[in-house]
Structure formats: C-alpha cells, structure tokens
Amino acid sequence: MQQRRIETRLEAALPRPEVAPVRLHQAMRYAVLGGGKRVRPLLAFAAGECTRADPQRVATAGAAVELIHAYSLIHDDLPCMDNDVLRRGKPTCHVEFDEATALLAGDALQSLAFQLLAEERLSDDPSRQLEMVKLLARASGSRGMAGGQALDLAAVGTTLSVPELENMHIHKTGALIRAATLLGAHCGTAVAASELGALDHFAKCIGLAFQVIDDLLDAEGTTATLGKTAGKDADQGKPTYVSALGNSEARKLARELHRDALGALDDLGERALRLRQLADFVVLRQF
C-alpha cells in the first residue's frame, strides 16, 4: 500500500511530459517512475508509524527524498562519474536522452525535492518543518551524499580500510537513508530526543548494511538479475567491502550491522515493527 502511495505522490509531483520543456520533463519522469525499490520512502513511512504521522505528509517527505536519490543516480551514471549505461533494467538517462538533458534532469529533480518540502505542511510546528528542509539539504550536500561521492571518486584505484569505507558510505549512501528515516519521524508528533537518537542509530546501521549487501550483489550477481552493470566496482578499481574483507566476512559484517540496527529499536516496541521488517529486507535481499 505504501509503495502505491509513494508512486502516486511522485507521479503527481513530477511535471507532466507534455509540458514545456518537454524533453527535460520526459527525462525527469523517465529517471524516477517505474522502477526502484523505494527503500528510502518506505523507511520514512515506517519511521512515521513510530510517531503516528499522517501518511499523506510522510508521502510528500518520502517523495522528496526519492527525488534526491533519483537525481544522484542520474549524475552518478554520467560519463564524468561512473559512466554506466544501465540502471533499473533500462538505459541510463544520459543514454536514453543525452548528457546535457540528463544533467539538467538531475538538477531539476533536486530543486523539486526542496519545493515539495517547502510548499506543503508536513508538521504543525513551522520550526520543525524548517529543520526538515535543513536535514535533507545537509544529507544531500558536501557533508552528506555529494561529499561521499567525491570520496568514492577519489578512492578509485586505491585500497581503503574498513573504517575508511565506513566513513565514505556513511556519507554517500547512509546520509540519505538517515534523512529519510528522520523526515518520516518528524512528520508525526514530537518525540523524545532519545527516540530520535534511536531511529538515527538504526538508520546509520541499516545504511551501512545496505552498502555492504550492494557490494556483495555487485560481486556475485549478473547484469540481468541486478538491472545494472554487474562487476562494475571491480572493473573500475573501486574499493568495496568485498575487496577489503572478502565475501564471507562482508556478509558477516552485514549481519552484525543488522543486529545493531534491530537493537536500537528495542525501546520503541511494536511501533517499530515496519522498521524491523525493512531491516530484514535490506540485509536478506537477493538478486
């Protein structure tokens, strides 16, 4: 149900494909709709259940996060970055359209994300809604996702230790996952700082586990099963949890992070049931 809700919200938020500039709007919709696991919006919905949030408010916050995620994928796939030609089982945005259109589509999706957070009431407390805008901006910028991508590009051809990998992926992958979780929680009633801290720790562990499993899938999967180019990390000389630890130890690390994530939710009781289920999905997912 929540996946249908987020798809509907994304469809409504994106400009119609016949509205000028037509090619740009078509590229934006191409990159966002009809694919992806929607893990980040689902985390927002699950965290919102912990604070009794209105699902419609959470849908808007989750859509904003997903737009940021989609923009990051467009830019990551560009020839100046990872130079990939396949994403979610179809040609990447710059292959389907062209590099300039893909670049602009990513830029426009980022702007649209913040428009959503600013134009609709997501909290009865205006100061909390302003904090939500700040939270997503920080998670997306040089101290979050963009900074993590810069570290990733700089690390090509080098060997990183596990703590160095953790630092990189706390920013590149984890920042947006943590933001999605906290944004969902902020859409509901105010909760104690300790509960927000528990949600943040959960999201930090799950964000890292997500990356460990991604590294394993890249090493063990096929292009057909993944919907993106398999073995790309090794081909490009990128340091990963698999290259640092080997497959077996990397999988062990994912299980440890999974346990830590679940432990962070102990005091939230049944309110955190959906978060626990999502944690299981992240770590147990296959090709």
Image: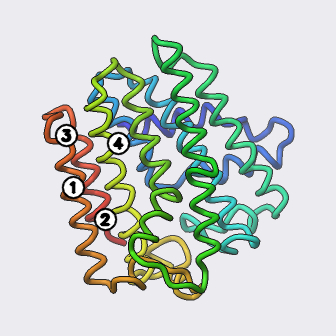
Tell me if label 3 and label 4 are in contact, CB under 8 Å: no
Say whether disc 2 or disc 3 marks the residue closer to the N-terminus. Answer: 3
Viewer-nearest residue: 6 or 144 = 144
Image: 190 above or below 273: above
Q: Amino acid at mark 1?
A: Asp
Say whether disc 1 or disc 2 marks the residue closer to the N-terminus. Answer: 1
Residue 2 placement: quadrant: top left
Residue 218's spot in the image, x, y percent? 45, 78
* Circle 2 residues within 10 Å: few <14, some 14–19, many ≥20: few
- Local SS, label 2: loop
Image: 54 above or below 133: above
Mark 3 — residue?
273
In the image, which disc is placed on residue 277?
A: none
Viewer-nearest residue: 27 or 269 = 269
Spatial CA distance of label 2 from label 4 is 22 Å
Spatial CA distance of label 3 from label 4 is 16 Å
Give the residue at x 33% y 62%: 209
Spatial CA distance of label 1 from label 4 is 12 Å
Residue 89's spot in the image, x, y percent? 55, 68
- Local SS, label 1: helix
Mark 4 — residue?
200
How many dots with numbers? 4
* Circle 4 residues within 10 Å: few <14, some 14–19, many ≥20: many
Residue 34's spot in the image, x, y percent? 55, 51
Image: 191 above or below 32: above
Residue 49 placement: quadrant: top left
In the image, which disc is placed on residue 260?
A: 1
Residue 272's spot in the image, x, y percent? 21, 37
Q: Amino acid at mark 3?
A: Leu
Mark 2 — residue?
285
